[in-house]
Amino acid sequence: MKKLTGRMVGMTLGFLGLIGCAGKRPHNLGARMGLLAPCPDSPNCVSSQAENERHQIAPLAFSGDPNAAFARLKLVLSGRRDTTIVVDLPEYLRVELRTILFVDDGEFLLDRTNKVIHVRSASRLGYSDFGKNRSRLEDIRGQFLALEGK
């Protein structure tokens, strides 16, 4: 009986530890004066507005109507099983991007003038993401481009 109780306690603590990997939703995100939050020094963030090569990623470029492009991005994001839209404004989206254990925060900012959607994705926890934020945004880019003209 003691062995079973010990296992149950261990499993419960392990499960609670896994839940803790999600981290808390940051409150310092959001576009301010056309800029997304800067990436931290750690390599687990990419942004189309970053100035250094390590964090730099291209924005989502589009042609045509900016509103249609942003609607297309929302369609892509809402169709992904790993993505939950948590803030939906006319020119700004904030999403939670989930892997098995972790939650990353993504942001998308419509730049009508330059016909791009700026992107940012950062891990909530840890130091390295092994390129997951970059690869996920590139996957979203591919889905976004595949819907262009449809």
Image (cartoon, helix red, strand yellow):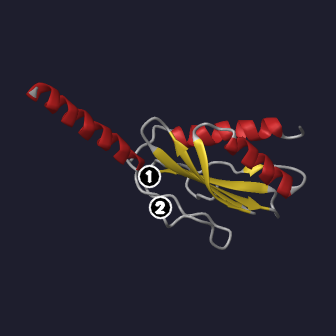
Please report whichever mark, 1 or 2, sits nearer to the chain's N-terminal start: 2
Farthest residue to the left: give it.
2
Q: Quadrant of the C terminus?
A: top right
Q: Is residue 108 left or right of residue 101?
A: right
Q: Nearer the viewer, residue 65 or 16?
A: 16
* Kind of residue at badge 1: Arg
Q: Is residue 91 left or right of residue 28?
A: right
Please say if 143 is above or below 118.
Answer: above
| Coordinates of residue 132 in the picture (x, y in percent) | 52, 38
Q: Which residue is mark 2?
A: 26
Residue at coordinates 79% horizontally, 39% vertically from top-left?
145
Q: Residues within 10 Å of mark 2 (few under 14, many from 20)?
A: few
Please say if 8 is above or below 65.
Answer: above
Distance between mark 1 and mark 2 Cα atoms: 8 Å
Farthest residue to the bottom: give it.
33
* Kind of residue at badge 2: Pro
| Coordinates of residue 85 in the picture (x, y in percent) | 62, 51
Count of numbered circles in the view? 2
The answer to whether one can see residue 47 in this image is no
Residue at coordinates 42% horizontally, 56% vertically from top-left?
24
Q: Is residue 75 left or right of residue 104?
A: right
| Coordinates of residue 33 in the picture (x, y in percent) | 66, 73
| Coordinates of residue 147 in the picture (x, y in percent) | 82, 38
Q: Quadrant of residue 148?
A: top right
Residue at coordinates 40% horizontally, 50% vertically from top-left?
125
Q: Residues within 10 Å of mark 1 (few under 14, many from 20)?
A: some
Q: Mark 1 near mark 2, Cβ–Cβ under 8 Å?
A: yes
Q: Secondary structure at mark 2?
A: loop
Q: Quadrant of residue 3?
A: top left
| Residue 124: numbered disc | 1
Q: Nearer the viewer, residue 103 or 41?
A: 103
Q: Secondary structure at mark 1?
A: loop
